[in-house]
Image: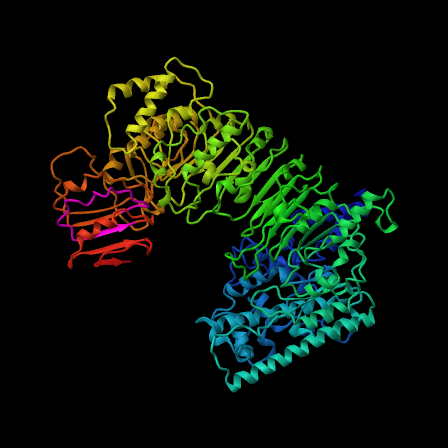
Amino acid sequence: MSSTFPLPLECLQLIIHHLIAQRARKSVAALLCVNKHVCSATLPILYRDPFVDMVPVPPISPISTHTNVAGFGFGYGLGTIDKTNKTVLGLMHLVRMLLLSMPPSAPFDDQHDRDDRRELVTELVRVAFFPDQKKDQDQHNDKAALSPQLPPTPLLPYYSFVTSVSFVDIAHATKSLLSNGLLTKESAVQDFMERTGRARKALAQEPLHRFRWDYAEKIIISEVAELQLLQDLTWALCFSNAECIQTLFISISDIGRYITLVPRLKVLSEVNFQLDQNITMLVRPGHEWTLEEGALLASLEEARTRQLEDMILFVKEHQHYHPKSIKVARCLNDRAYLDSCPDEYYFRLLQLLPPLNQPRRLDCNNWAQFAANIADTDLSCVKSIQYEKCGEKDRFSNHILEQRDFLQRCRSLEKLSVASFGEDMFKWAVQERRNFDGSKEAAPSQRSLIPLREYRIRFSNPSYGRQVDDVAYAFQDTLKIMSVSGFCPHDFNVHQNWPEFLLGCGDSDQADVDNFPSWPELPRLMSLYVDSTWIYLRVHRQLLKRLPRLSFLTLDDKRSRYNLADVVHWEPAELPDLIHLSLAGTPAISFHPDTLKSTRNLDYLDMRMEYHDAYSYIPHPAQFDQADMEAANNSIESVDDHDHNVDSSNNETKNNINNNNDNSFSTPSPQRQRPVWTWDWDLPKLAKLRLTSEFAYRFQFRMLAGTPNLLRFMVDINSFSRLHKRTVGIADLVKPGFQHPELKRFLERERQQQERRRDRFDHTYGEQEEEEDDEIWQEFEFVNLADLEEFLLVGPWMLDCRVLSALFGKVAPKVERVRLKECYGFTVSELVKSTSENLHGLQEAVVTIPFTDKLVAKAGLVEYSPEEFRHGDIYRLAQWPAGRLLCHPAKYEFARSDYGTLPIDLPHGNAGAALDLSSRFIHTDYIFLRIHSSLLAQCSQLKDLALGDRRHEYSTDTLKNTSKLRYLTMSMWSSYIPLVANLRELEDDSMGLSLTETTTTLSPPGRLIWT
């Protein structure tokens, strides 16, 4: 203990170690300036592994006196190196200081002069790290002139504190060092490589460089210079302080000289060999090796074999001189372009090492050494196993499979994250549990069960769920986290009839799942994640009832189609601690909505089906009507006005069900009745809501009354069939239970108005009645989402200007991002007016509605600057709106079709004079293009017609009276085309018809052109 610093050395060292662990190296470096006592305690810790992080060293006077770079104080001038790269600067300064503190090349022989350091600090190192030392041009033939002289040695032997020599972590800095001017034509290193013949040798030994890019020679020379530079630095640091080196990285091509150093490496405990040359690099297909190339490749392979044998010899010799000193040995190929160590040599290397000494953790750092000595390793202290590579592609998988019972020896295991190596992986644990439950006193080797808390497994092949059920049964008292993923191998066939993954079904047969008991209660399980991808996930109906403390639930498969009558629904569960609920595919359609009655702490709700090109499957609307009627008849509680806001236009599609592409439906059995979705849950903490497919189509806005803290709202009803439409009215946004004397009459008038305006051609509703209604609904009390930031409504939702005003003015006045994809019923002006007047914090609004430059200008919008252009046309308000809270304007983006088409306004369908149209090109992409049956009848002069959207609903009379039509292009995203029958009238040698995205089931007339 120092009299000027009354703190024991051990305490001071603990503080320094803690700072190092927190990566606070600048704070540690500052301790060097406190006093001699603190400095002597800090130096060995700060410099023991100097290249893990770049050590920020304060300038030492002998170095700073030679400073040539203003503003840095980092020793000698850096020449052409990038002075803005702090990593490169730190590397240069650190390496220089260590080199200058080294002794002569033979420190044990007093006859050697200090100038003989050039044998230890090579010429390449001098050229690279001391490029500004002056050379006498008149003495260019002198050997001393090939590299600069070293400056005086600093005061402290910094090199002696180094115990770990590894440049692997700074390889990127070395590349930056070599590429920022040192390998240009004028650089000293380039000149040195050419003058010494190293560049020519490097190119000669790289038989594949001709298959690289144009500047291959420069890259090859750069790589060789980098490798030699790292090899020389490693050797200099290791040779000068061999007795203290504990961790060492050796390039495999440089292994020869380290064998002679083995007697001095007394405390070496970890050695890493790095493969450093490409031999088996992929070449161009069909390339035939010349005799010269073949001979060169054979010589390189022979040299690689000698180097690998020397690697084995190095470890053997070290074990002979210093038995059991090396605890860790690896042969690395960290860089993707380098060859891998052959399994034979790697396994021989690992077998030379002693078994791991009571490891507490098995992971990628020690897994290989463990796999080579499984039987001899004491696993009683292992608490964590994390190695997901264990499987078919792992080089030691065969050794693991031969001794798969090693898990039973890990009696302290708490965390397990591996790839599965068999369904019977935990069969031993099940037997232990049965023995434990059947007897009060277990056998001596089983005094206590393994306290497994986290179970994360990745399957590389389809599984039917037995392993997961075994884990749930065997570790039911301690399990907190379960995560299951994978299932699909590389050659997985989606269309093959794979068995279902049964979760919570024990040893039951697939046909008897519903009647078989589920898991035992797991009182501590908090997180359950299962992603079975293309293997359908079938969950026991009572599973959630066994998980009372569940907080995070994610169940996912990629089912995209189903029949309502075949769905088996879970039983409702009490989950008061549930925070995160994400269900997709089979789990989503099986979920019982009554479970949400107990989830007051829910923060995230996601219910969806698998997407395909932004569309998901939704059963035919008629199926929902039938299922709802049966559910209502069999339910004790009746729900009034269930699904009252589903668009009445769905009734039109019921008669066309046989023409729909979706699966036909059948009557559900009494045991599989659909539960009633009441949409009246109390979820005060819900922040994020995402619904797609059937859940979005059946969504009721009254749910928002129970989610006052909602931040993100996303509901998507895009379906494959394009038959699912919804209309949002004022009635949907009014707060449930609100009473008003005019409410009932107002809602009835609104319903009638929506029916008349459904096709957007009937405008018989009086303006005076609209004005009266506008005054009435302003007095209503609406659902309030005061914190909502993002509002996304996707699909054919119909919203009029009145709904937009209520939505943004009453319901969610703080929305920052609005996205109305494929929604309709409003104009550009109506959208701009409702958002600019009510959303004072709006950042962007993205919509897909027909627009023209004239409409945009009329709405008060101007274009953004071109550099902010994205996928659509982006505009901003020309005039700053009153009450705007942000300093930048809101963006309005109107997405165009991918085909670059120009939508135009269609005249609305009152009869009138014949339209003088000779050509029309119309494509509205996601916006349904609905043409009145008599519209084109007025276009008697029409010759060229191009119509397109994501679905067509033209009347069969659409093309009548178009006698002069000579070319027709129709872009359709639906396989049902009602117009084909009428196209026969248009057959003519001068007319061509182009149909896109159609099926081959149609019978085209003689002159159809298919594209």
Is residue 335 visible in the rendered image? The answer is yes
Front residue of this view, candidates 953 and 765: 953
Quarter in which the C terminus is drawn: bottom left
Q: Position of residue 38 (x, y in %)?
A: 76, 48
Q: Position of residue 1 (x, y in %)?
A: 83, 46
Residue drawn at (77%, 76%) of the image: 111
Residue drawn at (65%, 52%) of the image: 457
Quadrant housing residue 999: bottom left
Residue drawn at (75%, 67%) of the image: 242
Is residue 3 visible in the rendered image? The answer is no
User: Is residue 388 rendered to the left or right of residue 803?
Assistant: right
Looking at the image, residue 898 lies above or below residue 679 = below
Image label count = 0
User: Is residue 750 rendered to the left or right of residue 347?
Assistant: left
Stretch in magenta: 948-971
User: Is residue 993 rendered to the left or right of residue 426?
Assistant: left
Q: Position of residue 992 (x, y in %)?
A: 20, 57
Looking at the image, residue 594 lies above or below residue 480 = above
Examine the structure image and report whether residue 105 is included in the region drawn in magenta.
no
Examine the structure image and report whether residue 954 is included in the region drawn in magenta.
yes
Looking at the image, residue 26 lies above or below residue 175 = above
Front residue of this view, candidates 616 and 775: 616
